[in-house]
Amino acid sequence: MTERSSFEQRKKELAGAAFGLLGNKALSKKTTGIDGVAKKLVAKQAGEVPHDPELDHPAEWDRPVD
């Protein structure tokens, strides 16, 4: 088993907590404040996704339900 110093363990726990917070903010519906900053950072890293025609749905799905 790998042994880690207390400092290294705290550093990894802090990094994990930071990524967890960033992930929660990036997946929220808010677009202002820290949430907006997180989304901009994620969008910058991810880049633009090309259009996938397999994900298009039929036009009849757009009509209102009776």
Image (tube, helix red, strand yellow):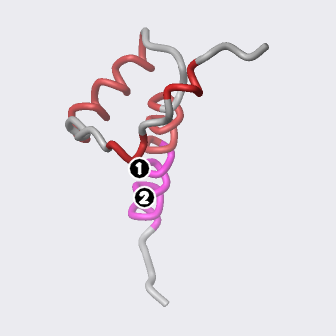
* 3D distance between C-alphas at marks 2 and 1: 5 Å
Looking at the picture, how far across and down is residue 11, in whole percent?
40, 55
Amino acid type, label 1:
Ala
The residue positioned 21% from the left and 32% from the top of the image is: 44
User: Against 5, is 39 above or below?
Assistant: above
The residue positioned 39% from the left and 47% from the top of the image is: 54
Q: Which mark is residue 35?
A: none
Label 2 residue SS: helix
| Quadrant location, the C terminus | top right
User: Against 26, is 14 above or below?
Assistant: below
Estimate how packed mark 2 is, as few (under 14), some (14 to 19) or many (20 or more) residues with alpha carbons within 10 Å.
Answer: few
The residue positioned 57% from the left and 26% from the top of the image is: 60
User: Against 19, is 36 above or below?
Assistant: above
Amino acid type, label 2:
Lys
Q: Nearer the viewer, residue 53 or 49?
A: 53
In the shown orientation, is residue 18 left or right of residue 64?
Answer: left
In the shown orientation, is residue 58 left or right of residue 63?
Answer: left
Looking at the picture, how far across and down is residue 18, in whole percent?
44, 41
Q: Are marks 2 and 1 in contact (CB under 8 Å)?
A: yes
Label 1 residue SS: helix
Outermost front residue? 60
The residue positioned 50% from the left and 33% from the top of the image is: 58
Count of all numbered marks drawn on residues in the image: 2
Looking at the picture, how far across and down is residue 42, in whole percent?
31, 35
Estimate how packed mark 1 is, as few (under 14), some (14 to 19) or many (20 or more) residues with alpha carbons within 10 Å.
Answer: few
Residue 7 lies in what quarter of the image?
Answer: bottom left
What predominant SS class does the magenta segment belong to? helix
- The residue under label 2 is 12
Residue 3 lies in what quarter of the image?
Answer: bottom left
Look at the image and give the residue range highlighted in magenta: 6-17
- The residue under label 1 is 15
